[in-house]
Every structure is written in C-alpha cells, then in structure tokens.
Image: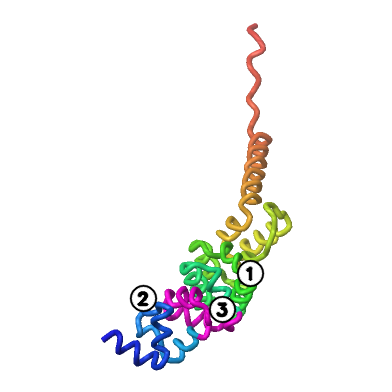
C-alpha cells in the first residue's frame, strides 16, 4: 500500500525515491508531486536525504531558497539545524525571515548563534523581531561595550527580549552586575548612619 502511494506521488521518479532513500525518511503523504520534484531537483543525495528528514512545513519553507543555495545549506546543516532554521522561517515576520534566510545561506555557521531553543523563543517573542535577528547575527568580539549598551537600551525599551542581551553579551552583563553591586555597596556605606561616640569617661 505504501509503495502504491509513493508511485502515485513520484510517478516516473520512483527510482529516484528509492536511490535517495526518501522512503526511509518520509511518508508519501509528506509530498505532492511538485514538492517531490523540487526536492529531487537539489541534485545531491546527502542534501536530499537531510531535507527529506524534516517536517513538510519546514521543507516547504526551505524551498524558498534556490537550488544553488539550498544544496550547500542542506549539506552543511544537520537535520536538527535544518528543522530549527525552518522553525524560524515559518514563525518570523517577512523582513527578519529574509534576513535569517540570507545570512544562513551565505554562512551556515551562523546557525550556531540562533540555534538554541531559548534563543529562538526569545527572538520570536521580541516586539521588534528585525532588531532581535540583527542583534543575534551581528559578529562581534568577546566584549563590545558600545554594542552591549545599545542592545541593553533596546531591551529596556521593550524592543527585544532581555534574555537575548545575556546570550549576546554575557561578559558585559556580568561586569555591569558587579558595577551595580559596587555602587549599591558604596551608597550603603555613605548613607549608613554613623554610630554615636562612646562614653568619654566618668565624673
């Protein structure tokens, strides 16, 4: 029965379904004839296998890339990373979605910056998703005080989720925490009432 379903979807491409082991990674219900043809047009077995492993919605989102970009991307990212990327593409607003897509297509390694689930949730929860995406994709060193300050202002104004500031600037946040603690201790010392002097002696 499953073979007949694959035959109905694949038609004369059924041999390619077998050669690329798509039937091991997906169900015939996951494809239309057009989407299966789009998958096979990638022309690379490893890329085809990985793309066949992600959900239908994720694969359809990734198909927005041209084959020249999709093939190296699928070869560079593991199945889970492809699924995470597609999760961004299906949830982000149009402008930040295109930025993520272009950034990862040109440099797949940037997926490591946005792949953690807590980061994805924080980006999607940000009021200004474009600012959140730009913030997380921006290259920088271990400590960039100017960028850290600007991102903290964005978080303070409610444009980006505060968690992203910690993810992007952990060193700056720790230093700021120590700075605030030092100021509070200093204020406490300055404002603490002084003790009255002891007795100067008897009569």
- Helix, strand or loop at mark 1: loop
Residue 6's place in the image compared with 169, above or below, is below
Question: Which residue is drawn at the image coordinates 64% and 23% (left, top)?
Answer: 196
* Image quarter in which the C terminus is found: top right
Question: Which residue is drawn at the image coordinates 62% and 42% (left, top)?
Answer: 181
Q: Is residue 32 left or right of residue 158?
A: left
Q: CA distance from mark 1 to mark 2?
A: 29 Å
Q: In the rendered image, which residue does mark 2 sit on?
A: 24
Q: In the rendered image, which residue does mark 1 sit on?
A: 107
Decide: marks 3, 1 in contact (CB < 8 A)? Answer: no
Residue 104's place in the image compared with 117, above or below, is below
Q: Earlier in the sequence, mark 3 or mark 2?
A: 2
Q: CA distance from mark 3 to mark 2?
A: 21 Å
Q: Earlier in the sequence, mark 3 or mark 1?
A: 3
Image coordinates for residue 29, horizontal then vertical, percent: 35, 85
What secondary structure is the stretch in magenta mostly built from?
helix
Q: In the rendered image, which residue does mark 3 sit on?
A: 70
Q: CA distance from mark 3 to mark 1?
A: 12 Å
């Amino acid at each position: 029965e499953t073979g007949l379903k694959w035959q109905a979807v694949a038609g004369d491409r059924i041999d390619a379904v077998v050669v690329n082991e798509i039937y091991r990674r997906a169900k015939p219900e996951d494809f239309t004839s057009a989407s299966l043809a789009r998958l096979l047009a990638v022309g690379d077995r490893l890329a085809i296998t990985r793309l066949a492993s992600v959900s239908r919605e994720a694969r359809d989102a990734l198909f927005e890339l041209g084959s020249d970009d999709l093939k190296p991307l699928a070869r560079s990212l593991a199945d889970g990373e492809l699924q995470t990327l597609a999760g961004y593409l299906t949830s982000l607003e149009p402008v930040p979605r295109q930025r993520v897509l272009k950034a990862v297509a040109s440099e797949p390694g940037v997926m490591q910056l946005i792949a953690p689930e807590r980061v994805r949730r924080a980006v999607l929860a940000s009021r200004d998703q474009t600012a959140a995406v730009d913030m997380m994709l921006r290259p920088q060193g271990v400590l960039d005080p100017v960028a850290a300050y600007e991102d903290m202002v964005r978080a303070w104004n409610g444009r980006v989720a505060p968690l992203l500031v910690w993810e992007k600037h952990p060193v700056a946040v720790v230093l700021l925490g120590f700075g605030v603690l030092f100021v509070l201790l200093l204020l406490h010392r300055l404002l603490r009432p002084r003790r009255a002097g002891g007795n100067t002696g008897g009569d």
